[in-house]
Image (spheres, rainbow, N blue to C red):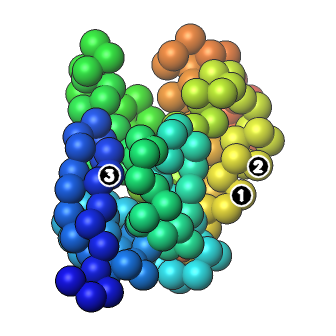
Amino acid sequence: MRGMRLLKLEINGDEVRLAAPDHWTLLEVLRYSLGLTGTKQGCDKGDCGACTVLVDGEPRISCLQLAAEAEGASITTIEGLAPEHRRAGGEGADPLQEAFDSCGALQCGFCQPGMILSARALLAHNATPSAEEVSAALGGNLCRCTGYTQIITAVLTAAHAAGGPEVPRPSWQAAEQASSS
Ligand code: FES
Ligand code: FES
């Protein structure tokens, strides 16, 4: 098969074998060979972070990585988070997914898979990040809809659910509470 390459990838805990054009990126293989469309194709040039996946637990821009370079690594996409959480004994979705939902940390949702995977990597290294650390960890993930505040609150909420500190109230909420007391 000229121009094609046989690939063996580990995706969301499963070994996957497939043939794909040898110039295809990991993003293209995920979306167009495997139908894992939770990984979003935004700018396709490394600017927006929508295509972020975890490669051996670290966030990676999948539109800039050849699929062949991912052989031998463990890849996690947004579709794999909830099953991984349940395999570890949890219930429902990953706590970050639950927190994004409960905090209303999305509008169109396009950025959300990449945001959540970047946040998952952060919490694996730092279970109790500050708002500034969350903001820095998500610096490569752009959102065209929200003001980022709820996204940061969602990550802090997931950290709190895992035993981290209370989530600081936004200043407008604290002011509202003070004026009503
Ligand atoms: S689609 Fe990969 S960084 Fe935008
Ligand atoms: S919610 Fe629309 S891009 Fe972030």
Residue 116, position in %: x, y?
48, 47
Residue beneath disc 2: 136
Q: Amino acid at mark 1?
A: Gly
Residue beneath disc 1: 139
Q: Are marks 3 and 2 in contact (CB under 8 Å)?
A: no
Tell me if residue 110 can be seen.
no
Q: Amino acid at mark 3?
A: Leu
The earlier-in-sequence mark between 1 and 3 is 3
Residue beneath disc 3: 9
Reply above or below: 105 against 156: below
Q: Left or right: 82 with respect to 122?
A: left
Residue 5, position in %: x, y?
30, 73
The earlier-in-sequence mark between 3 and 2 is 3
Q: Secondary structure at mark 1?
A: loop
Label 1 Cα neighbours within 10 Å, binned few <14 / some 14-19 / many ≥20: few
| Dot in front, 1 or 3 | 3
| Residue at far right of view | 132
Q: Residue at x 45, y 36 (%)?
A: 96
Q: Left or right: 49 with respect to 101?
A: right
Quadrant location, the N terminus: bottom left
Q: Amino acid at mark 2?
A: Ala
